[in-house]
Image (cartoon, rainbow, N blue to C red):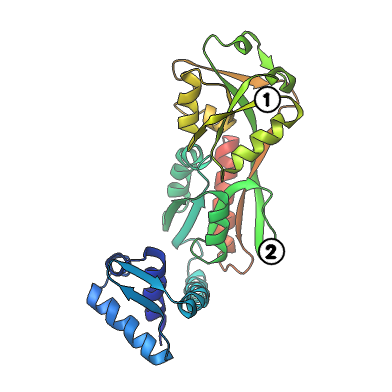
Amino acid sequence: MNLKDLKYLVALADTGHFGKAAERTFVSQPTLSAQLKKLEDYLGVTLIERQPKNVQLTEVGKQVVVRARRMLNEGDEIIALARNNTDPFAGRLKLALIPTIGPYLLPRVMPKVRKALPNLSLMLYEYQTEALLKKLRDGEIDLGIMALPAPQDGIESRELYREDFTVALPNGHTLGAKSSIKIQDLKGHTLLLLEDGHCLRDQALEVCSRVDVREAEDYRATSLETLRQMVVAGLGITLLPELAVESPFGSQRGLAIRRFANPAPSRTVGAVWRKSSTRAPLIDAVCDLVHRAIAGK
C-alpha cells in the first residue's frame, strides 16, 4: 500500500467515476482501476461496488477513504514542512472563499499577492461555509476566508476586516428618499435573500429580526449578483455587504444603494486554517496582504 493508491481511491470517492478519477490523478483509467484492485487485494476487502454506470464505495471503503484523506494530508504537510525550510513563501497554497466574499475581494488582493509573493502558486476555490470548513478539516484546502466566528475545534482564525451592510433598493422605492436608513425603516418591506447554506442569509435575517420584515418566499437567489438583478426587477429589497457595493456592479442602472445610520450592522470577515498547519508564515503573509488591500495600503 502506498500514498499514490490512496490518492486514486480518494479521487474515485470524490468523482464517483473511474474516468474522471483517472483524469484528476493524471493516469489512464486502466492503470487507476488496476491499482485500486491491487489495493483491495492487499487489504483483503472490497472497497468499491463496480456496477455499470454506477460506482459506489462499500461501507468499509468509505471508512478507508476518511483515513486516507488524513494520511494524504499528513503527506502534504511533510512536503510543505521540508519546503518551508528553504522558502516558506513558495510552493502551492489552496485558498477557498465563500461566494459572497470571493468575487469582490480577489480583484483587490490578487495583484498584491502576485507582487509580494512571486514564487507562490495560489489555487482558488469557492465553497459555502459548511463545505469550506469540512474541506479545511479534511486537508483539501489550506486556508479559508469566510465570515466569522468559526468553530474552534482544531481550527485557528484571524480577523481580516469588517464591512457594513447596505440596503439595495430598486429605483423609485419609497426608502430611496432617505439619505440613510434605520433598521426600523425596513418594517413591512419584502426582503430578498440568498438560498439556504449561505451565511449571509442568516446574517441578514439576524439584522432584520428586530422588525417585521417579510421574506420573499417565492424567490431565493443563488448569488449576490442574482439578488441584485431581482432588486432591479422590483421584486423586493436586500442587504448587500459593503465590498459587493463597491464592485463594478454596485452602481448598475436601476439600483439604488443606501447606507444604514450609525451604528450600521456589519459582518466580520476572517481567515481560518488548521491548527496543525505547517504553513503559518505563508498564511500570515497572505492575511497581511488581504488586510492591507482592504485598508487601501
Residue 43 rendering spot, x and y as whole percentages: 43, 90
The answer to whether residue 285 shows anywhere in this view is no
Locate the C terminus by quadrant: top right
Residue 163 rendering spot, x and y as whole percentages: 64, 34
- CA gap between label 1 and label 2 equals 35 Å
- Mark 2: give few (<14), some (14-19) or many (20+) Cα within 10 Å: few
- Left or right: residue 79 compared with residue 174: left
Q: Amino acid at mark 1?
A: Val
Task: Say which label, 1 or 2, has the lower sequence index.
Answer: 2
Q: Which numbered tag is attached to residue 213?
A: 1
Task: Check disc 1 and report its element: helix, strand or loop.
Answer: loop
> Up-down: is 102 above or below 134?
above
The answer to whether residue 34 shows anywhere in this view is yes
> Up-down: is 291 above or below 188?
below
Task: Check disc 2 and report its element: helix, strand or loop.
Answer: loop
Locate the N terminus by quadrant: bottom left
> Up-down: is 273 above or below 228?
below
Q: Amino acid at mark 2?
A: Asp
Residue 277 rendering spot, x and y as whole percentages: 58, 67
Residue drawn 56% across and 43% down?
Answer: 196
> Up-down: is 261 above or below 162?
above
**In the rendered image, which quarter is residue 284 located in?**
bottom right
Residue 100 rendering spot, x and y as whole percentages: 53, 39
Query: Which sits in the foreground, 56 or 255?
Result: 56
Discs 1/2, front? 1
Residue under numbered circle 2: 153
- Mark 1: give few (<14), some (14-19) or many (20+) Cα within 10 Å: some
Residue drawn 61% across and 69% down?
Answer: 276
